[in-house]
Amino acid sequence: MKIVGKVAKRIEAHEKAYGEAKYTPDLYLDRMIYAGVVYSNVPHGILKSIDISEAENVSGIIKVATYKDVPGTNKFGVLIKDMWFLVPIGEKIRFEHDAIALIAGETKEAVEEAIKKVKFEIEELQPVLTIEESIKDEIKVHDPESNIAFHKKIRRGEIDKAFENADLVIEREFRTDYQEQAYLETQGAVAYYDGEIMKIYASMQCPFYVQEDVSEILDIPFNKVDVIQMETGGGFGGKEDVPSYIASKAALLSYLTKRPVKLIYSREHDIKETSKRHPSKSHYKVAFKKDGTLLGVKVESYLDMGAYSTLSPIVMYRTLTHAAGAYKVPNVHVDVYGVYTNKVPCGAFRGFGSPQVLFAIERVMDEAAEKLNIDPWEIRYKNALEVGAETSTGHKLEFSVGAKKTLENIKKLSNYEELKKEVEEFNKTNKIKKRGLGWSHIIYGVSLGAGGQHLDASNSEVHVFPDGTINIMFGGTEIGQGSKTAISMIVSEILGQKLEKIKVLQTDTFIVQDSGPTVASRTTIFSGNAAKDAAEKIKNNILEFLSDKFDVEKSDIEINLGYYKIKDKNFTFDEIAKMANDANVKLNESGWFKSPKLHFDMENGVGEAYVTYTYSTQLSLVEVDTLTGKIDVKKMWISHDIGKAINYDGVIGQIQGGAVQGMGHAIMEEIKQKEGKIITDNFNNYIIPTIKDIPEIVADVVEEEFPYGPFGAKGIGEPSLMTAPPSIANAVAHATGKKITKIPISMEDII
């Protein structure tokens, strides 16, 4: 390889390091006005009246919009349109940040003053605030429908026989709480409608979602809605469907005023309105033989969707398919339910419904190891997947299964046998502080899987200019994960141009075809393969031209990094591009990649759930102060099978960042609410890890190449977080002797 798999500088590093990158708040258009939102501020009720007259009279106010001003549909929803854009009079308020009105003004100050002057009356109703209350169905969030809105299941094997034949059965209930994405840049959009084209600039993970929603709300066709990706300061799932809500607000006000409108959320409004990781309640019953062999897994799991379904049914699919973990298990019986409550809607978050259940099954594996007197590593290795084995959904694995290699890798990297002795010795000599080791071993289905095959395709455009410079635009988005660099490296590898001569343009829905969302660790496979396809076409065009010009076989032309060697003479790529352009060679190509067809029985949850899987192992060392309950994560050893690392440094960075975010979920981050209202609405009281909390991280990769990935690559974005919570929870349990059954683990849980 010329560049793939090597260390490369991020292509947008200079702009970001020097503050030159343009984010949505940096954008200013001539005659731009500012927007704000009027919220319900009650979790459940009926909107009886709205009076905007006083707000309209505030100096500097241009427009106050209500549901009456919406020209098209007034509902949101990826699968089910159950969420009001602007709540109409006579309809239900379902959570504290339901939007009632929008305001546009010349200054932010005028908008803030006008927000206070919008008068509205709400008949308050008793809210549904817990999973238990929701299941009772005594108070309906969406009349007259049941609060239990969705159900997905796996029925495989004979679960009752598994329990009859078991030497050990472990039965436990587990809970996980919210997690806030805590992206550095809050949600925001700038919209400008000139009477013909609606242009939207925003911080997003899927510009195509925004294009569709704005088109429906304004009742204008797709070819009049141009959505352009701005530099995005983090997403972690929180900028998948949510930007549609923000962009549509700005778009409506611009549509009504014919002026550019900027709407940037404060941190407080962002936390209160936007989606979170789903809280969960899961009941596990798991059967083992006395040698540690897994016989059966039975799960009943409830996800708290909040007030609206958003992406919950899709999240539930991943909860379902990951509920039995990364193991060979012939008998599987899983039920996953999505329930409504009068709280903030939940949706996409890095891991997408799998951290909740992977925490549970990994805690069960540790407890089984303890009861059977088997080392926690051994019980995982014994049940780990390999080529020829079947996943919990019955997907027979034919290639790219590095599960056991990640386990072997961490055992070696950590010097595990000696490490155990060191921890044991520390605990003997320390009365107050105790140390513990915790394993986790997980599976992650890459991309959207059988439940989202209709979205699993991607377009990329590659253009070689006469001076040898190259522009790329792909259908995914750069949200800080390094996709611009990885895809540039793929194009560089194929065409032979140096990375510094390649530029990636921001995604524009008027130029690239709908390529689905930047989620599910799919960008490298899908946008990368599409860019590879386009680059291969250009390479073939160039080689055919050079073959004729120099009277050589195409196979005799040697492509190196920065130059081509033809008949013992070197030509720079810049020279090659000039020659080809002057000869009218086609140097601009479109690439396309779509998912291989998956066969999956949705009724029984059996079959090929995903195109491929990553496998990951983590060992964590923690130190717990048994008097205060403080947990200190000392060190993490992490190994991921990702197929092929396109940009090795970028992969290691993803592993480190994900592990720290997962650590936050395990022991720090907690959304607190009072009577359905979020009270931890900024980073003063919603605690996330800082640089002082980051432990030593030893990260490494296993490369079991995926034949359908670009150069064998799979993905790393999601699984990098998912190993940390169960590993840390297991380490805390080891240190304290307590049965940890919920995350985040509080100091009170310890003492």
Image (cartoon, helix red, strand yellow):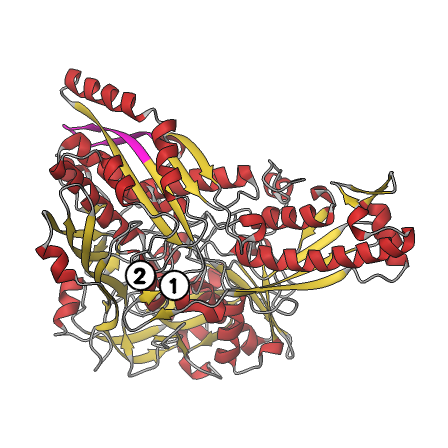
The residue drawn where x is 90% and y is 50% is: 550
- Nearer the N terminus, badge 2 or badge 1? 2
The residue drawn where x is 14% and y is 28% is: 627
Residue topped by disc 1: 608
* Residue 621 magenta: yes
Res 148 quadrant in image: bottom left
The residue at the far top in this view is 429
Residue topped by disc 2: 393
Q: Are marks 2 and 1 in contact (CB under 8 Å)?
A: yes
Q: Provide the secondary structure element on which disc 1 rests.
A: loop
In the picture, which quadrant includes the C terminus?
Answer: top left
Which region shows up in magenta? Answer: 619-636
Count of all numbered marks drawn on residues in the image:
2
Looking at the image, is 273 positioned above or below residue 55?
above
Res 419 quadrant in image: top left
User: Where in the figure is residue 134, as x and y percent of width and height?
Assistant: 17, 68
At label 2, the amino acid type is: Thr
User: Where in the figure is residue 336, as x and y percent of width and height?
Assistant: 24, 64
User: Where in the figure is residue 251, as x and y percent of width and height?
Assistant: 53, 72
**C-alpha distance separating marks 2 and 1:** 7 Å
Residue nearest the observer in this picture, 194 or 6:
6
Residue nearest the observer in this picture, 4 or 390:
390
* Residue 490 magenta: no
Chief SS of the magenta region: strand
User: Where in the figure is residue 365, as x and y percent of width and height?
Assistant: 21, 44
At label 1, the amino acid type is: Glu
